[in-house]
Amino acid sequence: MSIEIEVSTARCIASKACTHAAEGVFEVVDGVARVVDPTAAPLDDILAAADECPTGAITVRENGRQLE
């Protein structure tokens, strides 16, 4: 299983919803979220972070297929 997490810097508003939903996976630096450890939280938490992002800036893929 290969999980890819992408944060759109153009869409991110640094709400930190992702850092709360998937602790350890994301951090906010200079007003933009970034992935620091994609293995720090369960997949369900990462998907929750993507879902809770107010701008939809987070995309999660498994083996190239977008997850929702």
Image (tube, grey):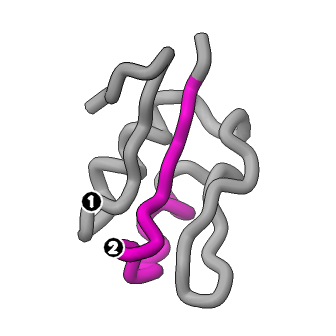
Return the residue at label 2.
Answer: 11
> Sequence-wise, which precedes: disc 1 or disc 2?
2
- Image quarter in which the C terminus is found: top left
Q: Nearer the viewer, mark 1 or mark 2?
A: 2
Q: CA distance from mark 1 to mark 2?
A: 7 Å
Do callouts 1 and 2 mark residues in contact (Cβ within 8 Å)? yes
Q: Residue at x 33, y 28 (%)?
A: 66
How many numbered circles are shown? 2
The magenta segment is: 3-20
Within 10 Å of disc 1 (Cα), the crowding (few <14, some 14-19, many 20+) is some
Checking the image for residue 36, the label placed there is: none
Q: Is 34 one of the magenta-colored residues?
A: no
Checking the image for residue 56, the label placed there is: 1
Asked if residue 54 is positioned above or below residue 64 in the image, the reply reads: below
Q: Position of residue 60 (x, y in %)?
A: 42, 37
Nearer to me, 41 or 59 = 59
Q: Residue at x 53, y 42 (%)?
A: 5
Query: What residue type is disc 2 on?
Result: Arg
Q: Position of residue 34 (x, y in %)?
A: 61, 64
Q: Residue at x 64, y 89 (%)?
A: 30
Within 10 Å of disc 2 (Cα), the crowding (few <14, some 14-19, many 20+) is some
Q: Residue at x 55, y 87 (%)?
A: 31
